[in-house]
Image (cartoon, rainbow, N blue to C red):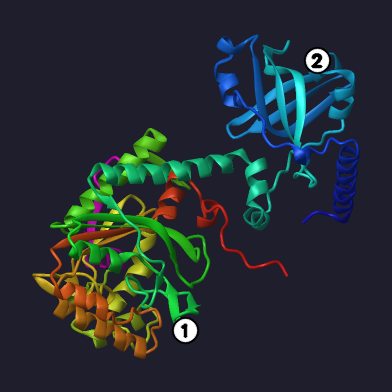
Amino acid sequence: MQDTTQQLNEHEQQRVRRQKLESLQNANADPFHQTTYTVTYHSKDITENFDELEGQVVSIAGRIMTKRVMGKASFIDIQDRYGRVQAYVRGTGIGDDAYTTFTTYDIGDIVGLAGEVFKTKTGEISVRASEVTLLAKSLQVLPEKYHGLTDTEARYRRRYVDLIVNPEIRDTFVKRTQIIKAVRAFLDGRNYLEVDTPVLQIIPGGGNARPFVTHHNTFDMEMNLRIALELPLKKLIIGGFERVYELSKCYRNEGISVRHNPEFIMLELYEAYTDYHGMMELAESLIRDVCRKILGTTTVTYGEHVIDFGKPFEKITMVDAVRKYSSVDFNQVKDTNEAREMAKKHDIHFETRHAKGDILELFFEKYVEKNLIQPTFLLDYPVEISPLTKRKPDNTDYTERFELFVSGRELANAYSELNDPIDQRGRFLAQEAKRAAGDDEAPPLDEDFLLAMEYGMPPTGGMGIGIERLIMLLTNSASIRDVIFFPTMKPVE
């Protein structure tokens, strides 16, 4: 927190800035009356192409980030979308009256500047100003130069300031956009069709999560913001689109953590005539391709770990992983009662609605998840926690499902999609029983989706990837809120 003296100083600076604006307005020089400014070059263009531009006149625009007034001459650093460039301003260059006005400009003000490209005596590439135009007055004081905006909550609440004063944050968000474009390009290259499906849904299906509820006035009915993209996309597969994807927002009324934000971008894709093995190949190829395009390498540093996406991803079943890290073999656990006894011995809390497969997942969460650092496909989830997934033909207690884990966190979830409408109805009814037993995140029965399935759904592989989690990995960001422009925050009281 800032001390009282600093707060008072800022209040005084804000008062002075408003007085400066009023003086400009009274002199018929209101900066907010400026409408356009022609920019011929950006900072990066000038610094990277100095040999070609030396001696030429350029016009740039951006925010004053530093200002050093030395009598009749001044140096300022102007920041634009690509970085900073120094400008040299003096009365003989822009005129004495204009220079006097310029000296009243503040750090944070936005200016347009025209002048000749040159190097100073110390060898710094600069622009010698022949004209400076105030384009917008900053009435707030930017954070102090050497400490910046370091309070995490303040950074999230005032992302616009965070972007101004922390260049590495701007780089993260540039990579965010590049990653999303690269994902789209990869899928487009595999002949997938990008589609969009409704955000407002009567039944929030496709996942286990509590939805946000809203009200449609015309129909006088309750509706939900979607928690997943799955069911409408599967309907498009049924309709004959053999490869579809959607990269869009989903909304889950759940807690906030380093891995969860109530609104987030999900990629879901579905491909007819393949299965979860096909989805494994696609996931591995997609992530490796995006890494190469964005980072120029398939090796990524995340926290204290070096992640290698270049090697074939590891594969292990959930049962084998739990046996490896807890020494409990669920192949030897006969039924739910025995699973519950095993959970008690290992101090794992469970609820009365939990069956054997649910308890296997609880063992995984306690013993295994944190150990999956290198990219690992965790295979063959129990049927109890996989209501939309095909059973394994040789062991119907388990399904053809995987989740991809990296650095101890889930990154992707994929299935051989269940396409038997009779089995699907039974799974939905089992989920309804869970809801009745108190699991308010269990998906409700969706008759319209079952009707669609009865027309015939081809064998299909499907996958979902949390895009922000992928961005976190590729930008070495510790929290999902570090890669969302405006994360959900509780209002300041």
Foreground pick, 422 / 24: 24
Q: Quadrant of residue 98?
A: top right
Q: Quadrant of the C terminus?
A: bottom right
Query: For this view, does 336 lie left or right of residue 408?
Result: left
Mark toward the start of the polypeptide (2 vs 1): 2
What is the x, y in percent for residue 407?
39, 53
In front of the other: 401 or 455: 455
- Label ID, residue 93: 2
Question: Measuring 48% from the left and 46% from the top, which residue is drawn there?
Answer: 476
Q: Is residue 394 magenta?
A: no
Q: Determine which of the numbered discs, if any, sits on residue 220 in the image.
A: 1
> With respect to residue 461, does 252 lie above or below?
below
Above or below residue 32? Residue 155 is below
- The one nearer the camera, 407 or 6, is 6
Range drawn in magenta: 308-326
2 vs 1, front mark: 1
Element at label 1: loop
**Is the residue marked by circle 2 packed among few (<14), some (14-19), or many (20+) residues within 10 Å?**
some
